[in-house]
Amino acid sequence: MKKESVINDNPVCQIRMQAISDTMSILSGKWKFHILGTLIEGNKLGFMDLLREIEGIGSKMLSKELQDLECNHLISRTVKDTKPITVKYAITKHGATLSPLIEELAKWGVAYRKSVHG
């Protein structure tokens, strides 16, 4: 006989778990929080600025992650008709709502590192 789940029977819990799943899907990966945090701090930045600021990321990965974030309306991409063409990335209004979450993750990370490494 299959044991019924106590947690997932609650409709409020199901909605909450779906929301967490959606959030993790959109923000998953090693680099998205780095990119978002950099854009929140740096306002409008070009591709090369981001590449320099985010230590360890490659240009292909940065390009892919920027596309994902743009598709999810967390960042905007503006192309200016200059010679050479200028592309700037910026956090959107909706993307900026992640600022408190990113700040709390940073605080948690600092506290965790202190507790583990002394």
Image (tube, helix red, strand yellow):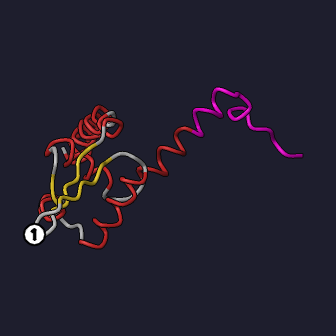
- In which quadrant of the rendered view does residue 98 lie? top left
For the view shown, which residue lies furthest in the front direction? 81
Which element type, helix, strand or loop, lies under badge 1? loop
Residue 103 located left or right of residue 65: left
**Magenta residues, as a range?**
1-18
Q: In x, y percent, where is residue 75? A: 31, 48
Q: In x, y percent, where is residue 9? A: 74, 31
Please state the total of marks drawn on the protein image. 1
> Along the line of sight, which residue is nearer the eye, 22 or 115?
22
> Along the line of sight, which residue is nearer the eye, 108 or 58?
58
How crowded pointer 1 is (Cα within 10 Å; few <14, some 14-19, many 20+) is rated as few
Q: Which residue is mark 1?
A: 83
| Residue drawn at point x = 18 percent, y = 43 percent | 118
Q: In x, y percent, where is residue 79? A: 22, 59
Does 84 lie within the magenta span?
no
For the view shown, which residue lies furthest in the right direction? 1
| Residue drawn at point x = 19 percent, y = 63 percent | 47
Residue 50 located left or right of residue 19: left
In the image, what residue type sits under mark 1? Lys
Q: In x, y percent, where is residue 105? A: 30, 39
- In which quadrant of the rendered view does residue 102 lie? top left
- Please, is residue 28 above or below residue 7 in the view? below
> Along the line of sight, which residue is nearer the eye, 80 or 61?
80
| Residue drawn at point x = 12 percent, y = 64 percent | 82
Residue 115 located left or right of residue 22: left
- Please, is residue 42 above or below residue 47 in the view? above
| Residue drawn at point x = 24 percent, y = 54 percent | 78
